Image (cartoon, rainbow, N blue to C red):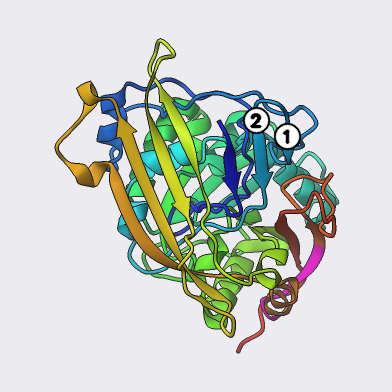
Amino acid sequence: MKIRSNLILPLAWGILPSAAFSPLPTGSMPKTPPMMILSASKSKRTGAMSRKSKKADDSSSGGFGKQTNDETETAIEIENPPQSIQDAGRIYSRPALYDLAFGYRNYEEEVRFLLDSHEKYSTSSEDSSAKLMNVIELAAGPARHAISALRHFSSKVNSSTAVDISKDMIEYALETADEELGDSGVGGMRDKFQYIEEDMRYIGQTDGHPMKPGAFDSAWILLGSMAHLTTNDDVISCFSSTSHLLCQGGTMIIELPHPRETFSMVECTRNGWEVPLEDENGDEYGELKIVWGDDDDAFDPIRQIRDFTVAMDLTISEDMQVNDSDLQSVKEIVPMRLFTYQEIEAMGRIAGFEVAGMYGALSDEVNVNSEDGAFRLVCVLRKIRSPVSV
C-alpha cells in the first residue's frame, strides 16, 4: 500500500493531534472487532483500535523518515493537524477513528526524544539528575504521549497530565489510560495520570482548574496542535499560561509543520492516506481513508491561515454495515495557522522563553535545516523568566 502525505493531522481540539507524517508504523496495535470500531467512533471507546502493521525502515529515527523500496513508497513532508479552541467540531468527536488514523506514530520513541531534550536543555534539574519529572501535554487528544511517558518511562516521570477541551477525546483517553496504566486507587501508574478539560490558552488560570505555579518540568504541544491558535493573542496567552505552570529552567517543546511548507505553497494540494483494518484473525474487513487538506482549500497568505478540508471515511465489509452513515463519514473545514521560527521565538520571548534547540523531526538526528530529512519544525523553548504583561 502506498501512503503519501504532505501534512500531519491533529487529534483533538485542545490538541488535535498534529503530527509529522511517519508513514510506516513501527509496531502493530491490538486487534479490534469491526463493531467495536463503529461503536467507538461515536466517541465511546470499547476496545483498542487495530491497524495493519507494516515493516518500518530501521534507518528511520523515531518513526520518521522517507523510505522507498520495491513494495512501499512513502513521501513524508507532513504538515500540521488541527485543533479548535472553540467547541470541538464533528471531526474531532470521533476519537477512535483519530487514534486509528495516527496509529503509525511511534509514541515511545517520540517520548524518549522529548524527555532527552528536556534533560539536555533544561536548567531546572542541574542539581539533581535523579529528579523525576512532572510533564503536561496540551491539546492532547487521545493523550498517547502523556500516557506513554508513564507506561514506558516511569523511572524518569513522576506524573503526567493531559489537557484538552474535547469531552469525547478525554473520555476516550481515560479509558485508554485504564487499559494501559492499570487500576486506579492502588498507588500505581494510573494514579499518576490525570486529564483536565481546559482551553490550552488559559490552562491553570481559571477557577475551575487552578494549578500550582511551577508545578511542571516540561510541557508538550505536539502534532501541530498549535496551528489552531490562529492569532498572536491566542499564542501569547497559551505560552504565558504554560510559562506560569513551568518551573524556572523548565522546557516547552512544540512540534509544527516545517516552515518550508508555508513558503513553497503556490497552491493548495490534496493530501491523504489510507489505513487498512484487520480482525483478530488478520483478515482485512475494511479501511479508513483520511484527507487532510484538499485542492480547493482557501489560503490567506497575509494571516498565514489555510482552511483545511479534513475528512474521514470508514469503509467496512457488507456484513458489518450499519445504518448510521454519520459514524462512517465525516467532513469539516478547519482553519489552521502556518508558523515560522521567527514568530515562535518572538512570542516565546514575551512569555519568558528562549529557544534552546531546534530539530527537523522528533529526533535528535534530524537537523532543522536538512533539505532532505527535515519535515517538521520542533522547537525546544526554555523558561528563563516570568511572562511580560502585554
Residue type at mark 1 is: Thr
Q: What element carries label 2?
A: loop
Magenta highlight on residue 343: no
Q: Residues in magenta?
A: 350-356
What's the residue at 35%, 43% (across, down)? 313
Mark 1: which secondary structure?
A: strand
Query: As rendered, which of 364 and 296 lies closer to the eye?
Result: 296
Q: Along the horizontal axis of the image, is 152 left or right of 372?
A: left
Residue designated by label 1: 68
Badge 2: residue crowd in 10 Å (few <14, some 14–19, many ≥20): some
Label 1 CA crowd tier, 10 Å (few <14, some 14–19, many 20+): few
What is the x, y in percent for residue 245? 59, 63
Determine whether label 2 and label 1 are within 8 Å by CB. yes
Which mark, residue 72?
A: 2
Report the front residue among 317 and 25: 317
Q: In this view, does 18 lie above or below 111?
A: below
The amino acid beneath tag 2 is Thr
